Amino acid sequence: MKLLMQRVKRASVTVEGSITGQIGQGLLVFVGIAASDTIREIEWMCGKITKLRIFNDDDGKMNCSVSDVQGGILLVSQFTLYADAQKGLRPSYINAAAPEIAQPLYDKMLDYLRQTSGLTVEAGIFGAMMDVELINDGPVTIWLEREAEPKITQ
């Protein structure tokens, strides 16, 4: 799984002229899912999203999490995080999960964040052409990557 997290003053997603998700201060999180990802990666990544200390405290130091500042989370699916452009001029997306695998995992991630974070969690629409607007705060942009844990076989 790959995440691109941006600390924002505000962000929104619009699909076909309608806003599908918007937040004030918080995190805009683009999510790329691999076919090998499982609930383990979702839980680990959600822990990072909610607990990573990238918001300023009263002294201007990055000591607070999105949970500490009661910010929002805007989750946007983005298979292009798995683009491989090392060969040629047209990126390959072979490492991204197919939609029938990625969408249920994306939905689980949304549900998990909503059930465990206590924060406002908004979203884009999986697979839709989305317009994303944001005011990046800082800018602070964090790249997180976690490979699926190997399955134990006996």
Image (cartoon, rainbow, N blue to C red):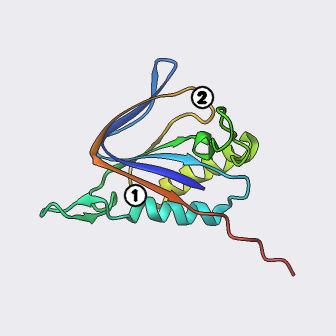
Check disc 1 and give the amino acid type.
Gly
119 relative position to 88: left or right: left
> In the rendered image, is residue 154 in sight?
yes
Residue 75 percent coordinates (x, y) = 49, 44
Mark 2 neighbour class, 10 Å CA radius: few under 14, some 14 to 19, many 20 or more: few
Residue 59, placed above or below residue 22: below
Q: Which residue is mark 2?
A: 128
Which residue corresponds to the image point at 29% horizontal and 46% vertical from the top-left? 139
- First of labels 1, 2 by sequence position: 1
Query: Which residue is situated farthest in the bottom direction here?
Result: 154
Which residue corresponds to the image point at 51% horizontal and 35% vertical from the top-left? 124
Which residue corresponds to the image point at 60% horizontal and 56% vertical from the top-left? 1
Mark 1 neighbour class, 10 Å CA radius: few under 14, some 14 to 19, many 20 or more: few
Mark 2 secondary-structure assignment = loop
Q: Which residue is mark 1?
A: 118
> In the rendered image, is residue 24 in sight?
no
Cα separation, mark 1 vs mark 2, equals 27 Å
Q: Nearer the viewer, mark 1 or mark 2?
A: 2
Residue 98, placed above or below residue 41: above
14 relative position to 134: left or right: right
Mark 1 secondary-structure assignment = loop
Check disc 2 and give the amino acid type.
Ala
Looking at the image, which is closer to me, 13 or 95? 95
83 relative position to 114: left or right: right
Residue 38 percent coordinates (x, y) = 68, 61
Query: Which residue is situated farthest in the left direction here?
Result: 59
Residue 110, placed above or below residue 92: below
